[in-house]
Image (cartoon, rainbow, N blue to C red):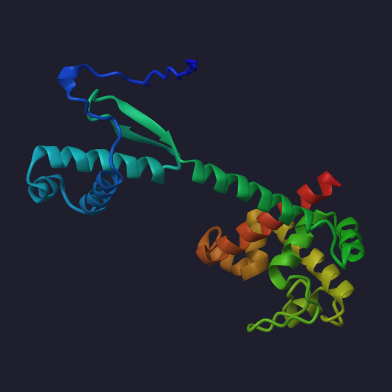
Amino acid sequence: MIQSVSYLHIKPLVAYSAKEKGVTTLIPFDTVLNSEQTAAGVQGASEGDAKEENGSQADANTAKDASETVDARNAGDQKVMYRDPVTGKNIVYVDVTEEAKETDSSAEKTTSATSMKKTKYDAYFKKAAQRYGVSESLLKAIAKAESNFNAKDVSSAGAKGVMQLMPVTARSLGVKDVFDPEQNIMGGAKCIKQKLKEFNGNVRLALAAYNAGSGAVKRHGGIPSYCKNYINKVLSYKEAFETASAVG
């Protein structure tokens, strides 16, 4: 008995004629790696030095292609382009690893926001927000950045409590016990309220003044460079608290 045999008829994506001697469009890993290493060395040199170092126009073109690839990655574009050695056409590859990283980052952000739904001093933050007309999420964000809600925290500069009030500032705000979380939060809310009023509602300037003092902001004609990380951190926490509140 003759048994029939089935075959899979698979067409190649690209068919080349015999005169092309079966040159493949696949680029060896070593070639790509060498191209990127060459590009890294060429970036810091002038165009003339690069050509002299490569020794030929062909090598210079290879370095240029690799450099464009590195630039595309640095620009945040995960679509990486290579040149087909046979057709001369550009081929786009997508780095799926980077896409996975973006997905992980989103999941991490969601987890972070979820974990910030409540604090042990929520009642005090709510009370302070209502009394001084300041965003509750902003007050929590300042406390998170300043002390991570540690009522006994003391900084190297002498700032104390949840909202990290300096002793002189605390007294001027009517805070008698800086280590009492309710008094400290009330004092911090009153302070940021004053800063917001002083700087016409500009939150970034108010935060800079809270962190470094109003005098420092005025001397610099704006936000001192050393306050920028602090401001970004507070605003990031503020957004996280608001997100957590919105999702319920």
Identify the residue at horizontal 79%, vertical 68% (top origin): 188
- Above or below for 190 versus 62: below
Marks counted in the figure total: 0
Q: Is residue 22 left or right of residue 173?
A: left
Q: In this view, does 165 lie above or below 72?
A: below
Query: Can the viewer see residue 201 in this picture?
Result: no
174 w.r.t. 230: above or below: below
Q: In this view, does 203 lie to the left or right of 32?
A: right
Residue in the foreground of this view, choosing between 87 and 53: 87
Q: Position of residue 93 (x, y in %)?
A: 41, 34
Residue plotted at (47% across, 18% down): 5
Instruction: Please name whichever residue, 29 or 236, is drawn nearer the observer in this view of the structure.
Output: 29
Q: Residue 42, how many percent across, how many down?
A: 21, 50
Specify the quadrant of the image occupied by residue 153: bottom right
Q: Please identify the quarter of the rendering in which residue 139 is found.
A: bottom right
Q: Residue 12: where, in percent of width, then height?
A: 36, 21
* In the depicted structure, whether residue 65 falls above or below residue 121: above
Q: Can residue 161 be seen in this view?
A: yes
Residue drawn at (22%, 28%) of the image: 23
Q: Nearer the viewer, residue 144 or 199?
A: 144
Image quadrant assignment for residue 103: top right
**Residue 137 in the image, given as x and y percentages of width and height:** 79, 55
